[in-house]
Amino acid sequence: MAMTMTEKILARAAGRDAVRPGDNIWVNVDVLMTHDVCGPGTIGVFQQHFGKDARVWDPEKVVIIPDHYIFTADEKARRNVGILREFVAQQGIRHFYDVGTDRYKGVCHVALPEGGHTRPGEVLFGTDSHTCTAGAFGEFATGIGNTDAGFVMGTGKLWVKVPETMRFIFEGELPPYLMAKDLILQVIGDIGVDGATYRAMEFAGDGVYSLNIEERMTLCNMVIEAGGKNGVIAPDQVTLDYLRARTDKPFTVVTNDPGATFHSERVYDVAKLEPVVAKPHSPDNRALARELSEVRLDRAYIGSCTGGKITDFIAAARILKGRQVAIDTFIVPATTEVAKGLVRERVEGQTLAEIFRDAGCKLGQPSCAACLGGPADTFGRLNEPLKCISTTNRNFPGRMGHKEGQVFLASPLTAAASAVTGRITDPREML
């Protein structure tokens, strides 16, 4: 029986020769990730059902990453991290990237691959909806709730329905004014925020395989904004080179069988696409950047798991080099590794950090920061009803703080161009 990548991964994890979309199966979990927002709730569920002194099923397969509400004076947020520390010490969990230590990494979805925890053919669950980011490495990765995660902690298994697969093929070479963010916003605008509900979204074509691994992560990161269960990209040499530099664990590359059945297939010619913006208050509220030139802005935000990787900052620096921002512009690296890249990577002789500071940007510490709003003292948080262009993934009311704030989602190129003019700006005007 011919199967898609997602079906083959789940069949292996279930110990079956084959599965079909709609099958309900028990899968063995390779990695469980949780963070400071959902970790305490997950731990509570685990201890309630398995006992206060119960042990996690495999301490080597649990990864805990504080990243959301960490650089804050808020006592409740700090207590959340305290609960994680107590649990890690009790359980002997080695993969704990604690804030304030040499091991701290930053945003979980970028920290996971940096730490070698994202491997082809595996099953990764995380207590965060954007866990689907890791599908860029050819694995089944998806977000789950605290109750499911508490169960996984105790058993290493989860009951899963096999999704059918929607295929998105991008043909051609990406123009220099487009990024993966434009591609995924185009797709979400086409199919809507419920257009892929409980389906796998697979990305393929020359336009995808010409992207580096960080850009592929951006594609998979936002499948949840279309209701997708998981995003997935078949591994190639780019994937393997990245992983071999970060893990020595064995893994098995999985690809589609010839003749595999897909729910649907959409084909895009990337040369015909333009820079895209998602208007408030939904990721599918799509417009072209050039159509929104009258929209005045108060703030620009470049960061998050979606837009805070080194590729994103190199793109922004191409625009900001030698220019001044007209509005408050916040630069937030996703991880400490990315933060090091800001002082290592150069555009036309200047480091990225120098370019951003010379342009008048404000640089923050590696974290989720304002992407999820957070406590009032969170760096970049919207504490007033401002209009913000952002490289983040979600623009619901209150998402970045103030419930009347307006968030426009865009690529780092579009966000940087808009920061310079103070209005939504097509980056082609500056490249």
Image: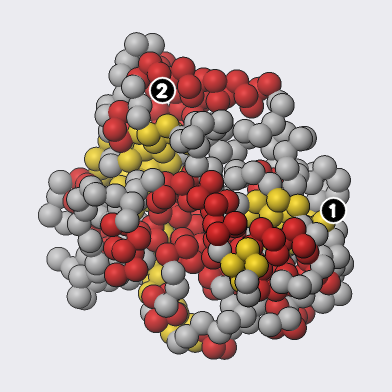
Residue 204 at x, y percent in the picture: 38, 74
Residue 228 at x, y percent in the picture: 46, 57
Q: Nearer the viewer, mark 2 or mark 1?
A: 2
Residue 221 at x, y percent in the picture: 50, 57
Mark identifier at residue 28: none
Of 125 and 244, nearer the camera is 244
* Residue for point 68% across, 46% down: 364
- Identity of the residue furthest to the left in this view: 17
Query: Relative to 246, is 275 above or below?
Result: below
Q: Is residue 266 left or right of residue 15?
A: right
Mark identifier at residue 386: 1
Structural distance between the alpha carbons of marks 2 and 1:
39 Å
Q: Is residue 129 left or right of residue 91?
A: right
Quadrant assignment, res 311 = bottom right
Tell me the residue that label 2 is attached to: 88
Q: Is residue 319 left or right of residue 424?
A: left
Residue 337 at x, y percent in the picture: 50, 50
Quadrant assignment, res 19 = bottom left
**Crowd class of label 1 (few under 14; some 14 to 19; many from 20; radius 10 Å):** some
* Residue for point 39% across, 61% down: 136
Q: Secondary structure at mark 2?
A: helix
* Residue for point 14% across, 50% down: 16
Q: Is residue 320 visible?
A: yes
Colouring used for the render: secondary structure
Q: Is residue 34 left or right of residue 252?
A: right
Q: Amino acid at mark 1?
A: Leu
Query: Relative to 166, is 48 above or below?
Result: above
Quadrant assignment, res 167 = bottom left
First in sequence, mark 2 or 1: give its number.
Answer: 2
Q: Amino acid at mark 2?
A: Val
